[in-house]
Image (spheres, rainbow, N blue to C red):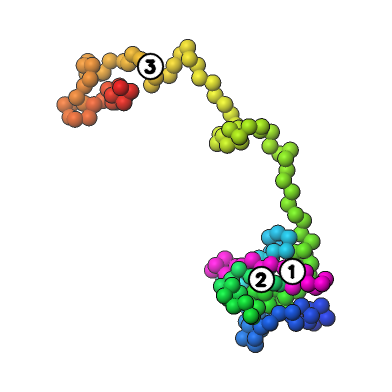
Amino acid sequence: MSTNDSAADKSIVEELNFGSKTSKRATWEAWEFSIEAPHLVRVTNASYGVEKDDHSYLVGIEDRDGLLVPSECECPADKYNEEYACKHRVGLATIGGPVVLEASVNFPTPSVDTERSNTSTLSEKLRADGGATTEEDLDDPPALNAEKREECPNGSEMCPGPNGDSLPCFPCYQLSEEQ
């Protein structure tokens, strides 16, 4: 079993201000690291098992004269206590070490792929059906737009509804909505 006792690890840890309780928690808990963007590492406390997603925070990496140091975390402990480093920052510095910190700095910046989209207008970009357009055939309008409707199956122009109840049949309902 190898340990991270290199000179770089010790100098990273020396840049952070934390107590013995934070040190113990950082070494006892299981950590997962994933790089989200340049200078941003998602630190997840996997000790929480299925609830680990609720204990996952972004940690910002700062370059201090060539030394990469976890500088800020979005967890409540780091937000409200500026004097001491949180366990996520300490865990990233000690467990993740220079390998994860270097990888976060060297993470490529995503570029916008302008050739991917062949749409030119805003209405084409916002069309939910993928950009397919339909043409209305004004010579043969749909049945709902017809001026003359088919007669009610009851034979009346406006029926009171089937069996004399208060709701009209569907063709009569459509006619009342159009008027």
Element under disc 1:
strand
Earlier residue among tags 2 and 3: 2
The residue sitting at the top extreme is: 139
What residue would you read off at disc 1?
A: 62
Q: Quadrant of residue 101?
A: bottom right
Say if 167 sits above or below 30 in the image. Answer: above
> What amino acid type should be assigned to the residue bearing mark 2?
Glu
Earlier residue among tags 1 and 3: 1
Q: Label 1 neighbourhood size at 10 Å, few (<14), some (14-19), many (20+)?
A: some
Q: 69 or 142, which is in the foreground?
A: 69
Residue drawn at x 59%, y 72% as measured from the top left: 79
Location of the C terminus by quadrant is top left
Disc number placed over residue 146 in the picture, else none? 3
> What amino acid type should be assigned to the residue bearing mark 1?
Glu
Q: 50 or 70, which is in the foreground?
A: 70
Element under disc 2:
strand
Earlier residue among tags 2 and 1: 1
The answer to the question of whether label 2 and label 3 lie on touching residues, with beta carbons closer than 8 A, is: no
> What amino acid type should be assigned to the residue bearing mark 3?
Ala
Nearest-to-viewer mark from 2 and 3: 2
**For residue 29: magenta?**
no
Q: Quadrant of residue 135?
A: top right
Say if 107 sits above or below 5 in the image. Answer: above
Residue drawn at x 17%, y 29% as measured from the top left: 165
